[in-house]
């Protein structure tokens, strides 16, 4: 398929319906406790890392003092294991009073005072995955109202301990119940991840109308194997997933583990780059108190974030899988720009990959290229062959501008442009992707 056709198809299907709460028109960014801190509730022996008020306050302090908030990382999200084992006398969920002495409202105020937002977790079912009280169908309205009363800004609804029938009722009901509270609350649904993430079991048209984001696939772990399996699943199923995404409705390949223990610097850049190509929510799960400057630099890369946050919200795709184990990914961006990622699955040494923009189906013209991680710029004509050196398990990522106008003489030299990308009625200027 020609890239222009792909873009057109994405715009038609993606922009149609989104949950009407006005939220998350660009992928949400922030921090989420799960991957790094799990269900550590042993505050007696591990006070620094246990799931407690202190952990979320520490992260909020880091987000607001270390330059994260200004880049868009504003959500501070609690995951499982925050609550008491019992609901209160009125049947409402309550935070564990030992670990959250001020309760959730105190945390919400702490976030809001700093220009941050608070997210919380629940589970459609009898229990959460960690064994805490779940939200069965009869508790949906109560729990939605409780979160709204606490001034929570986002809610992740997991799906342990419920069956398909209950989920089919529960996920849309929760969407309605959140809306009925009158408080805009971003809604993250784990529903598709419990059904293999693909049609016919999963209906992405419906999901887009009721959820702002959804987990399609299994939980990320702190390893390159895990990141690679997620990359393979999401791009292997891109024809189904790309049309599901758009402003207000996002596929969620799960947390960024950059800054943890499992990834090299090259692998960290790969995760950041491909999450940006996928228009993925960017929730870090790491320890911002001790993160290395290398990991921080990757997560705070302005160009990668800019690409991730593109307002058109079109999820990118893998366009080439070479026998050499180099893969090329592409995402259309606003202003007729685009992003390219050259990714190496090799495990031997840096590979010198040769191609040209015209081989990647870019239309005739001269392009300004910004290398996202080396922060260097170059100018390339579509026809010029170039070489990128891609490290094993690493990436080279480019922001590619709209093509500069070619002069008539250049146009004449390059001959008559061909194909659907050339529209003779627009000043005879070749252009890309529209
Ligand atoms: C470029 O377009 C041609 C013709 O539509 C198609 O066969 C080819 O796969 C495309 N290449 C890329 C990299 O998208
Ligand atoms: C609730 O849904 C209505 C109709 O779709 C929408 O206009 C409104 O903004 C929503 N309110 C909230 C708080 O999500
Ligand atoms: C799903 O769970 C509900 C509540 O436990 C039960 O009534 C229903 O029979 C179950 N449905 C299926 C298909 O297992
Ligand atoms: C998917 O959901 C949409 C919107 O809710 C609905 O119109 C459509 O019929 C559903 N598709 C299938 C195959 O169930
Ligand atoms: C993008 O390209 C199209 C087609 O050449 C053009 O009509 C449009 O003005 C361009 N948009 C921007 C923002 O440059």
Image (tube, rainbow, N blue to C red):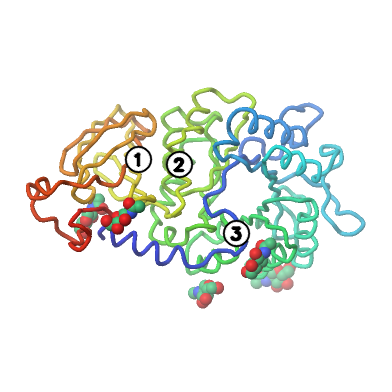
Query: Quadrant for ligand 1?
Result: bottom left
Residue occupying the point 83% across, 47% down: 84
Contact between labelled residues 1 and 3, with CB atoms less than 8 Å apart: no
Contact between labelled residues 2 and 3, with CB atoms less than 8 Å apart: no
- Residue 383, by quadrant, is top left
Question: Is residue 114 shown left or right of residue 246?
Answer: right
Give 127 or 36, whichever is nearer the viewer: 36
Contact between labelled residues 2 and 1, with CB atoms less than 8 Å apart: yes
Question: Is residue 228 shown left or right of residue 178?
Answer: left
Sequence-wise, which precedes: disc 1 or disc 2?
2
> Which element type, helix, strand or loop, lies under badge 1?
strand
Q: How many marks?
A: 3
**Mark carried by residue 306:** 2
Give 232 or 338, whichever is nearer the viewer: 338
130 vs 159: above or below: above
Residue occupying the point 34% across, 46% down: 329
> Is label 3's Cβ within 8 Å of ligand 2?
yes
- Residue 175 shows in the view: no
Q: Tell me residue 418's x, y (percent).
A: 14, 58
Give 32 or 406, whichever is nearer the viewer: 406
Q: Tell me residue 245's x, y (percent).
A: 47, 58
> Which element type, helix, strand or loop, lies under badge 2?
helix
69 vs 249: above or below: above
Circle 3 residue? 22
Question: Is residue 207 shown left or right of residue 134?
Answer: left
- Residue 374, by quadrant, is top left
Sequence-wise, which precedes: disc 3 or disc 1?
3
Alpha carbon distance from label 3 to label 1: 28 Å
Q: Tell me residue 33's x, y (percent).
A: 66, 39
Circle 1 residue? 399
Sequence-wise, which precedes: disc 3 or disc 2?
3
């Amino acid at each position: 398929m020609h890239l222009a056709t792909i873009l057109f198809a994405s715009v038609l299907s993606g922009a149609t319906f989104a949950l009407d709460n006005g939220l998350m028109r660009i992928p949400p960014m922030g921090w989420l406790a799960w991957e790094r801190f799990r269900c550590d509730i042993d505050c007696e022996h591990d006070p620094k890392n246990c799931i407690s008020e202190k952990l979320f306050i520490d992260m909020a302090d880091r987000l607001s003092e270390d330059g994260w908030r200004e880049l868009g990382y504003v959500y501070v999200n609690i995951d499982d294991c925050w609550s008491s084992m019992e609901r209160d006398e009125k049947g409402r969920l309550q935070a564990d009073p030992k670990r959250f002495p001020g309760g959730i409202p105190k945390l919400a105020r702490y976030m809001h005072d700093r220009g941050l937002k608070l997210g919380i977790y629940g589970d459609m079912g009898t229990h959460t995955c960690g064994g805490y009280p779940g939200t069965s169908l009869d508790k949906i309205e109560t729990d939605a109202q409780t979160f709204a009363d606490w001034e929570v800004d986002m809610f992740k609804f997991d799906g342990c301990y419920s069956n398909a029938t209950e989920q089919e009722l529960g996920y849309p009901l929760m969407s309605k119940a959140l809306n009925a509270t009158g408080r805009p609350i971003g809604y993250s649904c784990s529903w598709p991840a419990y059904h293999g993430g693909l049609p016919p079991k999963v209906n992405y048209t419906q999901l887009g109308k009721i959820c702002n984001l959804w987990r399609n696939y299994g939980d990320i772990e702190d390893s390159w194997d895990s990141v690679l399996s997620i990359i393979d699943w999401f791009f292997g199923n891109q024809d189904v997933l790309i049309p599901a995404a758009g402003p207000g409705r996002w596929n969620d390949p799960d947390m960024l583990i950059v800054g943890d223990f499992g990834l090299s610097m090259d692998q960290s850049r790969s995760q950041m780059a491909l999450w940006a190509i996928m228009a993925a929510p960017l929730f870090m799960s790491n320890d911002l108190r001790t993160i290395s400057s290398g990991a921080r630099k990757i997560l705070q890369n302005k160009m990668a974030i800019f690409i991730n946050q593109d307002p058109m919200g079109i999820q990118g795709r893998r366009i080439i899988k070479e026998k050499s184990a180099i893969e090329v990914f592409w995402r259309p961006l606003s202003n007729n720009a685009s992003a390219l990622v050259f990714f190496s699955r090799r495990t031997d040494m840096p590979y010198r990959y040769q191609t040209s923009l015209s081989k990647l189906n870019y239309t005739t013209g001269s392009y300004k290229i910004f290398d996202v991680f080396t922060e260097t710029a170059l100018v390339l004509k579509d026809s010029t062959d170039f070489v990128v050196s891609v490290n094993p398990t690493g990436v080279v990522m480019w922001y590619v501008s709209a093509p500069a106008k070619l002069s008539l003489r250049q146009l004449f030299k390059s001959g008559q442009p061909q194909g659907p990308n050339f529209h003779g009625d627009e000043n005879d200027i070749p252009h890309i992707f529209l």
